[in-house]
Image (cartoon, rainbow, N blue to C red):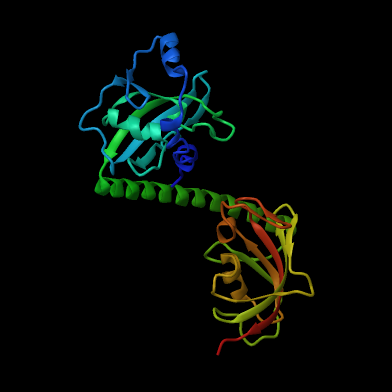
Amino acid sequence: MKHHTLLLSLLLCGLGQWAAAQFSDDPLASYLKDQQIEAQATPEGLYYRIDEAGSGPPPQAGDYVQVRYVGRLLDGRVFDRSKAGEPLVFQLGRRQVIQGWELGLPHFTKGGRGQLFLPAQLAYGRRGAGKVVPPNSPLVFDIEVLDIMDLDAYDRYMEAREAVEKERYERAQAEQFAIDQDLLRGYLDEKRLKAKRTASGLYYAITKKGKGKTTARVGDEVEVQYEGYLLNGDAFDTSGIEAPYRFTLGEGKVITGWEEGLTYFKKGGEGWLLVPSKLAYGPRSIEEADVYVPANSILIFKIRVTDVSVKS
């Protein structure tokens, strides 16, 4: 699952400061007066306003609270917000959010909507939050409490979210795979390269059969010279003639396209592997030293299998 990094990564950076910090005036009180906002004050120094009452009991320490929110500075600038369809879920009383939320959320119930007005010492204090929240900034949060869950309800919620994320990922993979297959067919036609397609969607072409008795198998140690290209012809990696890459098939040391593709080659065999993105690096981009592979890239490998040490 994705996290709302601002609230969950800057854990309580103002914790403890509120007790020691003293202010000659109350900027929140002035703000509320100027904006003609009626809000309730708490002994800790925050204000809250309930625009729509919810139902049921308020959250207690240990409960999981699901919240949709927008965070603003007093000048109206939005510095953070929950994404559509991705409310923030956190466990109250476990120091996962700023102190103002820990103190303010218990004033809301399930279905409740309103605002929290937090002094800086209950938010991000003297340090602020990166470039988006200046030091000593009071904050305003528009809050909607979507749910209050115990541990069992939270587990069910997470299972449902994971199922949705899995379905979304698999759907995206299927769509990308269809795109990749169209691109690969176009590439083969353009290059007039005859290649065989496997059930996984991998293409391979053997230009030199080699002299080994059998093709490489899982558990065999293979040594490969290779040149790697993106579909547009840009080279992204090479072993070099003097430094072939040696590894054992089936140990997860290489991309899935290699794990399968090299099993069609014998020692001394040469040819091509044309790897759809899901059998390569998928939606991840790779940036390592001089190697750059954009996300969802089809990879083209020119290979020569220099050795196959057959397992006993």
Indicate the position of residue 89 as horizontal and vertical percent values: 37, 40
Furthest residue in direction left, as rendered: 56
> Could one spot residue 58 in this view of the protein?
yes
Residue 207 appears in view: no
Q: Is residue 226 above or below residue 84?
A: below
- Could you tell me residue 137's position as x and y percent? 51, 25
Q: Closest to the observer: 247 or 100?
A: 100
Which quadrant of the structure image shows residue 65?
A: top left
Up the image or down, 55 lies above or below 234; here it is above
Left or right: 244, with 136 as reference point: right
The mark total stands at 0
Quadrant of the image containing the C terminus: bottom right
Query: Residue most toward the bottom?
Result: 312
30 or 262, nearer to the observer = 30
Residue at position x 51%, y 19% in the image: 76
Q: Is residue 245 above or below residue 21?
A: below
Q: Residue at x 62, y 61 (%)?
A: 275
